[in-house]
Image (spheres, grey):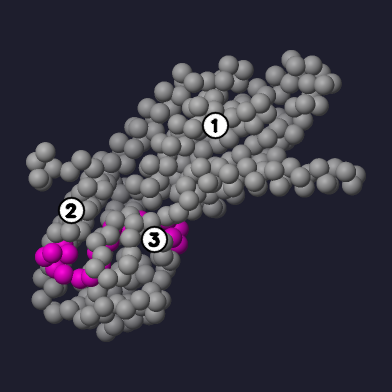
C-alpha cells in the first residue's frame, strides 16, 4: 500500500498525530469526540500524560470547549495567559501550559470533536506559524471521518439485510443470532467513532397467563402485537429482535441517556395502547468502557428489577 494511503479514519488519525508530534512537539496529541458533556479520547500520541484511547473527560472542563466557543486562540504557546484557558477546570487536574486545538466537523457543520495538543511547558511563539498546517490536517481528517461514517452507515444497513435471513418466524423480527451479530457490529462502530448507544431489554409479563387462559393462538397474537410495537419504535438504523420465548431487545444506535429515557417512555405508552403488559429495562453503553454486551446485561438487570417491583405492587392490591 502507498505510504500516503490510509485504509480508514483510525489509520489517518494515528498518522496525523505522529506527524504533528514529530514536527511541532508537545507531549500529548489527541483526536477526540464530544458527546453531550463527555469528551472521549479516540486516538492519542502521548509522551507523559498517560492518556489513551477510551479515556473520558468532561467536555466543559476542556480547553477545546473554550476554543470552540471562541474564548481562546487555536494555538496558545502560553495558555495560562489566556483568560478562557486559565479558567478551564482541566488545568487544575493536569499541568497544561501550552495548547493547540482545531475542531473536527461533520459535513453538515456540526461538531464531531477536536484535533488537539497540550504540553506541561510553555512553548516558543514560533509555534503559532504551525496553525495553518494543523487546520489543514484537521479539515483533511474531517473529510476522511465523513467518508468513514458514511461507510459505517452502509455497513449497518448491510448487517440489517443479512439479518433478514435470520428471522423469528412468528414475529418476523431478527432472531437471537441476528441480534448477537448486530451487537458486535455496533460495538465496533462505538469503539471506532465514540458513538453512544443504548440497549433495551423487554420481557412480556402475561404470556404464560395468556397461553393458559386463551390458548397458544392468543399467546402468539400477543407476541405479534409486541413485535409490531417494537417495529414502530425503531429508526432505520436501530435493531429490534426477539431474543427468547417472551423476551425482546432493542439496539438503539447513537443514543445517549436523555434520548434513551424518552424512548422508554414512548415504548411504555405504546405497549399500553396495544394491550401488551411488559417490563422494560434500558442501559446506555458507557463511553470508553464496558461495551454493548455489558449494557445488555445491565438492561436485563433493570428489566428484572422493574418486573419484581410490578409483582410487589400487584400483590399489595
Q: Which residue is mark 1?
A: 240
Please name the residue shown 83% across and 47% down the image.
Answer: 313
Residue 38 part of the magenta-drawn span: yes
Of callouts 2 and 3, the N-terminal one: 2
Please name the residue shown 62% across and 28% down the image.
Answer: 244
Tell me if mark 3 has few (under 14), some (14-19) or many (20+) residues whose alpha carbon lies within 10 angstroms of its own: some
Mark pair 3, 1: CA separation: 30 Å
Please name the residue shown 47% across and 37% down the image.
Answer: 183
Which one is closest to the eye, mark 3 or mark 1?
3
Counting the numbered discs, the total is 3
Which one is closest to the eye, mark 2 or mark 1?
2
In which image quadrant can residue 307 be found? top right
Is residue 91 among the parts visible in the rendering?
yes
Mark pair 2, 3: CA separation: 20 Å
Q: Which residue is mark 3?
A: 55
Please name the residue shown 43% across and 37% down the image.
Answer: 184
Residue 291 part of the magenta-drawn span: no
Q: Which residues are magenta?
A: 20-39
Q: Which secondary structure, mark 3?
A: loop
Q: Which residue is mark 2?
A: 15
Q: Is residue 125 above or below residue 5?
A: below
Of callouts 3 and 1, the N-terminal one: 3
Is residue 88 among the parts visible in the rendering?
no
Amino acid at each position: 500500500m502507498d505510504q500516503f494511503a490510509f485504509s480508514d479514519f483510525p489509520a489517518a488519525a494515528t498518522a496525523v498525530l505522529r506527524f504533528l508530534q514529530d514536527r511541532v512537539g508537545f507531549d500529548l496529541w489527541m483526536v477526540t469526540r464530544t458527546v453531550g458533556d463527555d469528551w472521549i479520547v479516540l486516538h492519542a500520541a502521548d509522551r507523559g500524560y498517560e492518556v489513551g484511547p477510551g479515556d473520558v473527560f468532561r467536555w466543559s472542563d476542556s480547553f477545546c470547549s473554550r476554543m470552540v466557543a471562541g474564548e481562546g486562540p487555536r494555538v496558545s504557546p502560553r495558555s495560562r495567559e489566556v483568560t478562557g484557558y486559565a479558567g478551564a477546570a482541566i488545568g487544575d487536574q493536569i499541568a497544561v501550559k501550552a495548547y493547540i486545538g482545531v475542531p473536527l466537523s461533520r459535513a453538515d457543520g456540526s461538531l464531531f470533536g477536536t484535533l488537539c495538543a497540550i504540553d506541561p511547558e510553555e512553548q516558543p511563539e514560533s509555534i503559532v506559524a504551525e496553525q495553518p498546517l494543523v487546520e489543514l490536517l484537521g479539515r483533511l481528517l474531517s473529510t476522511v471521518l465523513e467518508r468513514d461514517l458514511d461507510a459505517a452507515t452502509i455497513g449497518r444497513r448491510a448487517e440489517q439485510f443479512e439479518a433478514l435471513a435470520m428471522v423469528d418466524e412468528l414475529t418476523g423480527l431478527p432472531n437471537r443470532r441476528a441480534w448477537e451479530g448486530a451487537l458486535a457490529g455496533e460495538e465496533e462502530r462505538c469503539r471506532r467513532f465514540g458513538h453512544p448507544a443504548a440497549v433495551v431489554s423487554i420481557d412480556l409479563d402475561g404470556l404464560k397467563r395468556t397461553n393458559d387462559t386463551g390458548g397458544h393462538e392468543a399467546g402468539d397474537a400477543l407476541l405479534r402485537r409486541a413485535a409490531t410495537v417494537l417495529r414502530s419504535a425503531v429508526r432505520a438504523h436501530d435493531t429490534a429482535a426477539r431474543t427468547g420465548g417472551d423476551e425482546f431487545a432493542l439496539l438503539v444506535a447513537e443514543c445517549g441517556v436523555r434520548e434513551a429515557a424518552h424512548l422508554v417512555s414512548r415504548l411504555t405508552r405504546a405497549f399500553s395502547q396495544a394491550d401488551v403488559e411488559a417490563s422494560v429495562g434500558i442501559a446506555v453503553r458507557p463511553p470508553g468502557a464496558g461495551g454493548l454486551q455489558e449494557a445488555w446485561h445491565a438492561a436485563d438487570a433493570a428489566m428484572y428489577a422493574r418486573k419484581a417491583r410490578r409483582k410487589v405492587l400487584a400483590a399489595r392490591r
